Image (spheres, grey):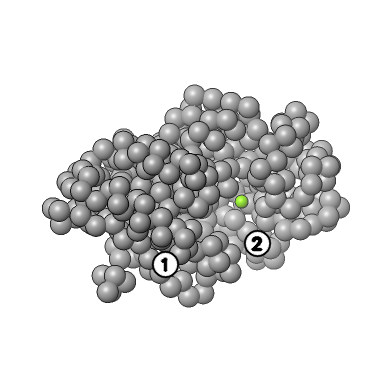
Amino acid sequence: MKIVSVRALQPETPGSPPDWRTQLGQILVRIDTEDGLSGYGIGGGGLAGIHVVETVLRDMLVGQDATDVEDLWNRMFRHTLAYGQKGLVIMAISGVDLALWDLRGKRENKPLVAVLGGQANTTVPMYKTGWSPKEVAEGKLEGFRALKLHMGRMTVAEAIDQMALVRKTLGDDMELMFDAFMSWDLETALDVCKQMADYNFGWLEEPIRCDDLAGYAQLRDESPVPIAGGEHEYTSVAFDYLMRERLHTVLQPDVCWCGGLTELVRIYELGKKYGLRVCPHRGSEIWSLHAIAALDPDPMAESGRPWMRFVAGQPEVVDGKITLGDAPGFGVTFDEGLWL
Ligand SMILES: [Mg+2]
């Protein structure tokens, strides 16, 4: 299954929130093989990511056999080691890796959930990521297993008020989490953690900057609530460190950024080894969902926003759950016109 072309583009995403979806730019990668198959994956890095895919990675991949995806991943990582390792280059590799996995599933004529040892048509429970307490009050939570609320840039008092209010509104049975998106310094985060212990939260996500590993070590030692993070971390090498040092209790790799499905599978293996939970970022998007359905001992997919309108055939969310189909690979299709 020789690779004959490697291409990437940044599709239009009308209506997307102005964040990583648009500013940073998610890229669509397509790999064609000589037997007429095409594999697709989503990576990141915008125009710079496209440059990496269509120069460095393409030159390395064209003419190679697409079958041994893990070997190709290791070679791409090694090939870019001097300037890669984290960030944009790994986001670009992620898209290529996902396209290679799509080809793997199509060649075996199986959905990737089955390639990974799970069952087609598996239903995955979901948690809802909410952006305002108003959404909570409007009760759009039917069927969802849990709620995660974004805290934005709140003061300690505002954050604790918010937590108390949401817990009171939803009752004691609903699983609740909060995401601070790196908004606080360590002192503030510790203060919030100590005060929020009374309200029974599943996790507090990214309370401080993702690169403040000393801060996370202090939170590990002093926070009474579990700390989640990892959506801005790259490769199983870094996740191995986070887990070994127990800097996070819940690990949240983003498959389109952390190195693709090859790395997500390795991160799930690390989770098993260290006895820690892996709960992928934006897990209900199709790129993580097959791995969650096949590999996760406590599957829970994060709700998304409908920004990837250029991806056809994505499963619908029904009553807070999402069910994979049985089409080969990731099971999604793309308009050929994108490539004209
Ligand atoms: Mg987050």
Q: Residue furthest front?
A: 82
Q: Which residue, given by chain and number where applicable, does mark 2 sit on?
A: 131
* Mark carried by residue 267: none
Q: CA distance from mark 1 to mark 2?
A: 26 Å
Mark 1 or 2: in front is 1
Which mark is drawn over residue 10? 1
Asked if the residue at tag 2 contacts the one at tag 1, i.e. Cβ–Cβ closer than 8 Å, the answer is no
Question: In the rendering, at what x and y percent does residue 201 appear?
Answer: 70, 42
Q: Secondary structure at mark 2?
A: loop
User: In terms of secondary structure, where does tag 1 sit?
Assistant: loop
Q: Amino acid at mark 2?
A: Trp
Q: Residues within 10 Å of mark 1 (few under 14, many from 20)?
A: many
Residue 189 location, quadrant: top right
Please state, as top left, top right, bottom left or bottom right, where the C terminus lies in the image.
bottom left
Along the horizontal axis of the image, is 303 left or right of 36?
right
Residue sitting at 65 percent across and 33 percent down? 247
**CB at disc 2 and ligand 1 closer than 8 Å:** no
Counting residues from the N terminus, which is met first, the one under dot 1 or under dot 2?
1
Residue at image point 56% right, 43% down: 233
Dot 1 amino acid type: Gln
Task: Identify whether 337 is placed above or below 7.
Answer: below
Q: Residues within 10 Å of mark 2 (few under 14, many from 20)?
A: some
Note whether residue 145 is visible.
Answer: no
Expressed as whole percent of the image width and height from the top left, the position of residue 165 reads 78, 55
